[in-house]
Image (cartoon, coloured by chain):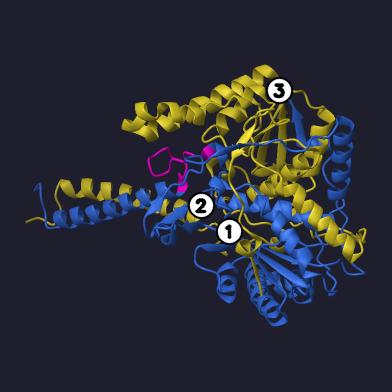
Chain colours: A yellow, B blue
Amino acid sequence: MAVFSVLTPFLALVLCVVSGILVLRSRHQSKVVDPRGKTQADFKPWVDQDLQDDCEVPTREDEEGEWVDSNMEDDVLHVPYSPQRHPEDEMLQRSQHFYALMNQRRSVRFISPEPVPREIIDNVVHTAGTAPSGAHTEPWTFVVVSDADTKHQIRLIVEEEEEMNYRQRMGDKWVKDLAKLRTNWIKEYLDVSPYLILVFKQTYGALPNNKKKTHYYNEISVSIACGILLAALQNVGLVTVTSTPLNCGPQLRLLLKRPPNEKLLMLLPVGYPAKDATVPDLSRKPLEDIVVHI
Amino acid sequence: MAVFSVLTPFLALVLCVVSGILVLRSRHQSKVVDPRGKTQADFKPWVDQDLQDDCEVPTREDEEGEWVDSNMEDDVLHVPYSPQRHPEDEMLQRSQHFYALMNQRRSVRFISPEPVPREIIDNVVHTAGTAPSGAHTEPWTFVVVSDADTKHQIRLIVEEEEEMNYRQRMGDKWVKDLAKLRTNWIKEYLDVSPYLILVFKQTYGALPNNKKKTHYYNEISVSIACGILLAALQNVGLVTVTSTPLNCGPQLRLLLKRPPNEKLLMLLPVGYPAKDATVPDLSRKPLEDIVVHI
């Protein structure tokens, strides 16, 4: 039997192609599943300043252009810092009052259409912007929507996606559970709330030389800013519900004309609670269940 | 030339093997890179209540046992909610004062060894625990370390990792930049601070029937809680620096005897600022650079 045959080159070719694909995939995959590997590319010199974002996986978008690490510590002047100091008893009181205030916060889906002064919303957003961020990149954009048409378009996009999700999930049980599910994807508050705050994370920025600057930990940074935003809303007596419209990010980004480096992280309807607002009757874990002293 | 040869079965065999590997990888990869796919397994019925965590990718740990979706909306009584309401001028004032307070916050690495009453720290952590979380899972554990030995062991683990990171990165420039880098990995505050708060995210929980309950969006939920924690610290006049010890998570988890479902998200040294504390002379973006009105 001959060593070579008409099939040999064909099989060899197919083998090469498949192997090629395999290598490419494994490369891509290693990037995806091991974003914290200690290779040159992954090293983060400013880690102590910084927040970790496991989500920083390369996407086609991110891979364009040349990447540059940033280290705010370099060449930055240091200045004295001596903030106001309170006596111990006052600190204790302040800590108690702030806990009491924050503990009254609830996620509220029934929001009043009453107008809210825009200056208050601006102060709340400005407060969120004081959050720390990886290498001080401040990778957030707060899109505040009060225009009725835009709010309605947002509602249509979100509800369509939600309904699709529920239908796919439910399958047979669909008809039976329709009524119950309906309440889950109908989001009246998207029309009713005086403001919708759409929080975008900037996955990368632009340097003066037009090189891309990676925003490591951008998701954690923006989430921390959202925590401070929730505190600021509670402090003035406004309510919201923390939501992430599943799969709507790209459509909403286009609707709001945000650049490709921005990705939707959260959508927060903001206003006064409706007169007849209700919340699920849930309690929070007691302190001893969330803290461990060593 | 013959259609078949001695090489044919060999090549065919290799082709099968390689194809097999390719298929397996692509399956695994699709899990990893497409955690939001709308398959049965990935569907999140409580998405509106919830926060998105792109980091929810299956790991060996997560794949053990049987997974159960949770939906806090089911079978939960709803109760009226009418929080305190302030007149507009008071709201405006409160929003201005809270912004002024939060805008004084800085990341501080020079922390005083002076003791801080534990009750104040407890109130601060309790406040962080009021954050919203995916399906109300409250997926956080705050380990508050005041024990000197444990603090020192934490320092040794963190500094060793940091030094390794810098050495690997620096290569040739190593000797030249040694002095400058040293300041980057020496973390005196880990010994000096009266408290180290290590914030762990619970990637999954246990149901009464011992099934695992996935904690979707646990990283975003815990990051929001950290934002509220930073606000609570600032409110009482204590300082910290938001840090994520790169690659130290597993070692620190074992040192602090945390269970495998918990992963370290942040390490916050907490105390009064040192008398001679300095901070990098940085400014924050003006409001108009972070907000867009529509």
Rendering coords of residue A36 (x, y %): 56, 60
Give the mark nearer the N terminus: 2 vs 1.
Answer: 1
Labels 2 and 3 positioned on one and the same chain = no
Q: Chain of mark 3?
A: A
Q: Nearer the viewer, mark 2 or mark 3?
A: 3
Q: Which residue is mark 3?
A: A113
Residue type marked 3? Pro
| A279 vs A145: above or below | below
Q: Tell me where residue B151 appears, x and y as whole percent.
A: 70, 77
The numbered disc on residue B201 is: 1
Chain letter for the residue marked with disc 2 in the picture: B
What's the residue type where badge 2 is placed? His
* Residue occupying the point 66% across, 26% down: A257
Find numbered disc 1 in the image and state the secondary structure of the residue it sits on: strand
Using the image as rendered, state which of residue B271 and residue A53 is in the foreground: B271
B120 horizontally vs B59: left or right = right
Q: Quadrant of the N terminus of chain A?
A: bottom left
Could you say which is closer to the camera, residue A284 or residue B32?
Answer: A284
Query: In the shown orientation, is residue A105 left or right of residue A284?
Result: right
User: Residue flagged by tag 1: what amino acid is it?
Assistant: Lys
> Which-is-in-front pick, marks 3 and 1?
3
Q: Are marks 2 and 1 in contact (CB under 8 Å)?
A: yes
Q: Which quarter of the rendered picture does the C terminus of chain A lie within?
A: bottom right
Q: Quadrant of residue B160?
A: bottom right
Q: Which residues are magenta?
A: B33-47
Q: Badge 1, how many Cα within 10 Å: few under 14, some, many 20+? A: many
Q: Which residue is mark 2?
A: B215
Give the image quarter of residue A231. Answer: top right
